[in-house]
Image (tube, rainbow, N blue to C red):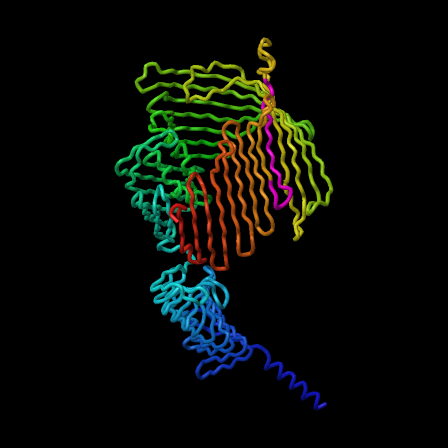
Amino acid sequence: MGRIILCLILILAAGIRGAPAADIISAGKGPVSIEAARMTYHSERKVYEAEGDVVITFQGGTLRADRVVFDNVTQEAEARGHVVAVSEGDTLEGEHLRFNVETKTGILDGGTLFIKKNHFYLQAEEIAKRGDASYTFREARATTCDGPLPDWRFTGAEADVTIDGYGTLKRGTFQVRDVPVLYVPYLIFPAKTTRQTGFLFPRIAYSSNDLGWDVGIPFYWAVGDSADATFYQRYMDKRGFQEGAEFRYCLSKGNFGTIYGDYLNDTKEIIESEEDGLSRNWRENNRRWSYYISHESQLPAGISLRADLAKVSDIWYFRDFDSYNYYLDHRGEGTFERVSFSADRSLAALDSKVRLVKEWRFFNLMALAQYTDNLQSYTNDDTLQRYPEVTFTAIRQPIFQTPVNIELESRYDNFYRTAGYRGHLFDHHPVFSLPLRYGSYLQFTPKMELRFTRWDASVNPDDTQATNTSRKMYSFGGELSTEVSRIFDVKIGAAEKIRHVVKPEFTYTYTPYVFQDDRPDFVPEIPEQNSLTYALSNILTARYTDDDGTVKYREFLSLTLSQTYDILEARKDPAIPADTRRPFGQIGMEMECNPVKYFSLDADTKYDVNSGEWKVINSRCGLSDWRDDTLSVEYRYTQNSVEEVNLSLLAKISELVDFGYVLRKNLLDAQYLETRYSIDYHRQCWSVNASYADADNDRQFMVIFSLYGLGKVGKISATPAEW
């Protein structure tokens, strides 16, 4: 019996010694929690000694180590063995750390700082944390590469880093696999996690014919929480020095905008140059400029304001600078990246608009002022401007709780130009409809449209021959449609069921003849019409279940065929030869096909049944796979106007190498628009891209070397004639 009691005591004693110890200590900036396998407290010195999987939790971070001595008076901890300290998101690792949990300062011997946001490693013989986000290093090494032997790194005798700011290295080198290849006396690198004031990475390019060396050094200014600015300094040795500035602001949610402007004293002489039928002869410096202003506001009472104002100094601005300009760089989605036009050399006109909109549940009132710059003419005198335009719109809605619906658009325009007709236009256009349903299979909606248009037009303000005329028109018709569907139980891939919908539609429209030859050119013509349009749509939708059990639906095929039969054409004078009467219009086809995850096919075509010719063919086929290899083939054809094939290929040669190929060919003129080859070699922390392009009689070779976390540190571009 005595032996049994002794064994139980020994077992209990062993269990007590092996249990983890924990304590919570009061601190100046919050409690400090200590957990460890073994812990001793020296009450006379108020010092804790903890060993074995020590975890200290304090406000804003944690400290882990094999052994920690913590002074509860000074709030200082001395940690040894597998030390990992996380403070305000920064991670320090090493073997010996002296750290104050209240001031968040300390010194780490022989360790590493890891900035997760930038995936940045900073190693040093000694790391001193001077504040919440400030560090100094002795014998430092900086890289974004993983592993004990990084592909590249910067070294320095001294370094200073401010998280969410910049870092500096002094008296260092740039090393590739521990081999110094470049002496770096002083280096500034980003350690940002949010926007900060400073220089952005420079842009370097070369053009042998147009711009010469093209170097841009943008400077970013974080003005405040609701505003920032970027100053663009750009030198083109064949053009001169261009200065630009962009200011962005966000006053409140829904109230924001962008203001941009640039100026260049163009030093290039252009003698007897002609493009698109426009010639110029510049023999001296030309002052060239552009600006863009965009603003959006959500005002009280459901009122919104949107302004887009753009202006350039001359019609050749986008032709000369389409390789790179602010407008091309800022196209895209997002709050600020919303330039409202494509700023390339093919831009025919530049519009400036201001819109004020008031919305109700069923109504909309818009006031618009628009000014247009014609970029395909020397003068803007005959370009029609509209200010203001006021439009009142009522969406389809019942009339006084009856089954009859009404929708309405009423518009007033004031048209102005220096040369040609100008004047006022009022157009009132209500549409009445009566939706009827016969069971669940047939829908019929008869419609009647009324249109009253009034205008006055003159050639100049003093014109005594001003016309004041009106036009009254009506049209009626109807839409008839039905829908038949069936669900098939299938087991094709992930698809469990497929729903097939067949939807035929018929639309009849009649508009009588109205004399309109006296209208000015700013009043659109509404032709006589008596036609029947019929369409047939087929839609296939698959039902499938994800791995997590979620039921999903995917429309993988939509095919619509349509054609218009012109009754007026069919009823022409019988004396006219029958083969010249062509009442059957073109057959249109629209198709979207996505049968599997890695394949897509889109097509939009028009076929003339009278001549047996294709009038329009626009189609695109896309292929991809699980490795992200992609192939896209596009064919664009408009009879006697456009015939072009575009091919784009991205192939994953290996995990480290990608091959790209782009081909754009004008089949109508048998001319290659662009051919581009590229090789991209990418590692975990760096990449190099080499490309060769032959486009529009210009050949270019480019090499871009990127260090992840720092940006592109090299860019070489040249034409083969200069190699």
Check residue 593 for magenta coloring. Answer: yes
Q: Is residue 275 above or below residue 660?
A: above
Point out residue 377 in the picture as x, y percentages from the top left corner.
Answer: 36, 28
Q: In this orientation, which residue lies closer to the viewer: 498 or 302?
A: 498
For the view shown, which residue lies furthest in the bottom direction?
2
The structure residue drawn at horizontal position 38% and vertical position 26%, both measured from the top left corner, is: 384
Q: Is residue 160 above or below residue 644?
A: below
Q: Is residue 211 above or below residue 448?
A: below
Q: In this orientation, which residue lies closer to the viewer: 277 or 102?
A: 277
Q: In this orientation, which residue lies closer to the viewer: 66 or 149?
A: 149
Point out residue 289 in the picture as x, y percentages from the top left corner.
Answer: 31, 39
Quarter of the rendering containing residue 312:
top left
Check residue 304 for magenta coloring. Answer: no
For the view shown, which residue lies furthest in the right direction?
489
Assign the N terminus to one quadrant of the image.
bottom right
Number of numbered discs overlaid on the protein picture: 0
- Magenta stretch, residue numbers: 582-600
Point out residue 616 in the picture as x, y percentages from the top left corner.
Answer: 55, 29
Point out residue 320 in the picture as x, y percentages from the top left corner.
Answer: 36, 39
Q: In this orientation, which residue lies closer to the viewer: 703 or 697?
A: 697
| Residue 340 shows up from this direction | no
| Residue 596 shows up from this direction | yes
For the view shown, which residue lies furthest in the left direction?
284
The structure residue drawn at horizontal position 50% and vertical position 37%, both measured from the top left corner, is: 665
Quarter of the rendering containing residue 197:
bottom left
For the view shown, which residue lies furthest in the top direction?
575
The structure residue drawn at horizontal position 49% and vertical position 52%, both measured from the top left corner, is: 680
